[in-house]
Each structure stands twice: as C-alpha cells, then as structure tokens.
Image (cartoon, helix red, strand yellow):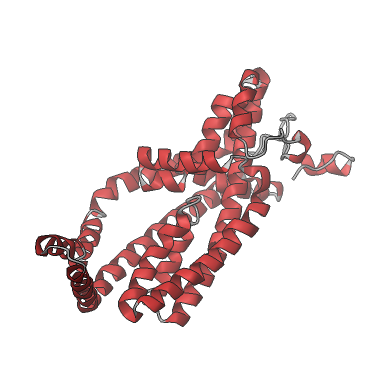
Amino acid sequence: MALIVVIAVAPVQGWLRRHGWPGWATTLVVVLLVYAILLGLALGIIISMARLATELPQYASSAQGLVDSATAKLAALGVGPEQIKQAAGSLSLGKLAGVIGALLSSVAGLASNFVFLLALLLFLSVETGGAGDRMASIGADRPRISEALGHFAWGTRQYLLVTTVFGFIVAVLDTIALGILGIPLAITWGLLSFITNYIPNIGFILGVIPPALLGLLTGGPKLMVTVIVVYCVLNTVIQSVIQPRFIGDAVGLSVTVTFVVLFFWAWLLGPLGAILAIPLTLLCKALLVNIDPKARWADALLRASAKEPDPAELAPVKKPRRRRGHRADPVDGTDGQIAEQSVRGAPEVP
C-alpha cells in the first residue's frame, strides 16, 4: 500500500522540480500529501464506523419486526419450530451490532501497523528523489526491467487516477440519491461507495448492501428495491460504460483475470488485498512477464484484447538522459531539462 500511494503522488514532486522548487521542499510536499491522504481516509473510516455503531441500535425494533414476520411466513410454509428459532437467532440485529463493536475495539490493535505504515511512507517519500538515478542504473544493465517497471508505474497511476475521479463522482451521486430517499448515514454510504470503487467487478455489490438493508428497515421492501435500482443505474453507467473508456490500456487485464486475482489477493491479504488487487497484479505482471521476452505467451493469456497492443499507443517510457550537474526526475528518470529539449524540437512526452 505504501508503494502504491507513493507512486500515485510521485508526479507532484517531478512537477514541482520542473518549476524550480528545491529538493527538500518537494520531498516535504510529497510527505505531507501522502500523510494527508492516508490520515484523511483512516479518519473517515473510523468516524463512519462509530456513527454506524451508534445508529444501528435505533432500528432494533424494526429489525425484530421483520424477523417476526419472516418466521411467521416460515411457519406457514411448514418449517419446524427449532429451525425457525435458529433462523431468527441468525437474523438478530444485535449480532451485527456486536460485530461492529468488535471492529471498533480492534482499532487500537491496528495502531502498531498504522505507525509502521506511516514510517514506511516517510522513508519511501524521502527516497523518491533518487528514484530516477536508480532507474537509470537498472536501465543501463537491464533495459527491459527498467521499461517494465516504468510501464507498471504509469499504469498504476492511470488506474488510480481514473478510479479515484470516477469513484468520487459515484460517491457524490450515491450520497445525493440516498439523501433524497431518506436513507440514514448517506455520507457514510457515499464514503463506502468511494472505497469499494477500487474493488473490481464486485465493489458495487459490497457498497449497496448496507444502504439497502437500512432502506428495508426504514421504509420496507419498496425502499430497499428503490435503493438497489438507483445504485444499479448510477454504478452501471459510470463504472461499466464510462470508466473503462478512460482507463484504456493502463490495466490491460482480461475480465476473467481481474475476477480471479481479486479473490486471490483478498484471500492472501484480506480486504486491503481486494482494494489493491489491480496494482498488485500489474506489479507481478511487470516482474514476471514483461521483463522476459520468452513470456509473451503469458501476456497473450492475461491481456484484455487478443490482439497485441501497439507499443505506440501505450505511454512511452522515457530513457534516462542525464547531464552533468542535473538530477534525474524522480518520476521517470529523465533529465530535469526536458523543457529545453522540447524547445529545440524534441517531442515532449507526457
């Protein structure tokens, strides 16, 4: 996670350096930006969980009424009393509240991991200033490795940028729709929708379950179905039709591969693995497939299109061209004087 976050904000440091900022100032900006992103996200999650734990007990009576209605229908269908008792116990809202309370109590146990992540982010952010020199050294001896890592960084940034922008759009629209429908904690569910947008294929399903259940408790089955329909319309149009057009070849993974790796990383790393499934898969693909010319057959099985993509359509990886007295750009390893090269007629690579 630390590596992905630093890669996402690294272009900021390169942009500041090209505008004359000193190295220490660009490093400080990157560190503050990384910490702001992580702390803001963590704070939003903690506050949302606390509000949810406070709000749920208010719907205990409604939930119990639904459970009684469901058990009565089961009895009418001939289900035995013991089975009905077990089913009623499994549908208890108190158990759900207990699970949320356990999650809140375990936040303190995550403090040590969070401190480690903050320290790791600090060290990685400080060392981004020398990333260009490192990539230049790798490229001099192993150009394919340097090229593969460059494409991984570019693809990861494109994926995160597009996913973040459209996730924010979806979150705002979902929050407005839930507010209009009168669903409690609309902002909380908007934040959940934003986070689950990073989970491919099934993120939308995970994001719609809590507001749909609250819709059932507050307005009955009709409101629950309305919430599901609104989510389906908004998320299908944005995430399935518009968003893939902007991601383009940044990911380049087939739908089947994306679905399989999602469950693999979730099994291996838990919820965080599901959120970072695509960047982690791109890193493994870069290190295991893209660096080896003999592994092109594996790339043919992994990519979304059966036709091999035209290299000219992919983001080019700039070859390091260093001059005496100039530091390499920490984003892509190029010399800091690329603006002068473009003035002399050399094409400027975005």
- 283 over 90 or under it: above or below: above
- How far from the left and from the top, in percent, is residue 79? 17, 63
* Left or right placement of residue 242 versus residue 322 in this view: left
* Image quadrant containing the N terminus: top left
Q: What residue is rendered at 34% in x and 78% in y? A: 220
* Image quadrant containing the C terminus: top right
- How far from the left and from the top, in percent, is residue 282? 55, 37
**To which quarter of the image does residue 90 belong?**
bottom left
- 232 over 340 or under it: above or below: below
**To which quarter of the image does residue 308 belong?**
top right
Q: Looking at the image, can residue 167 be seen?
A: yes
Q: Which of 342 and 221 is in front in this view?
A: 221
* Left or right placement of residue 3 versus residue 298 in this view: left
Total tally of numbered discs in the picture: 0
**To which quarter of the image does residue 39 belong?**
bottom left
- 224 over 200 or under it: above or below: below
- How far from the left and from the top, in percent, is residue 8? 56, 47
- How far from the left and from the top, in percent, is residue 200? 50, 50
Q: What residue is rendered at 61% in x and 22% in y? A: 295
Q: Nearer the viewer, residue 202 or 144?
A: 202
Residue sitting farthest toward the left: 82
Q: Which of 134 and 212 is in front in this view?
A: 212
Q: Looking at the image, can residue 337 be seen?
A: no
Residue sitting farthest toward the front: 78
Q: What residue is rendered at 83% in x and 39% in y? A: 341
* Left or right placement of residue 270 versus residue 29 in this view: left
Q: Nearer the viewer, residue 124 or 311?
A: 311
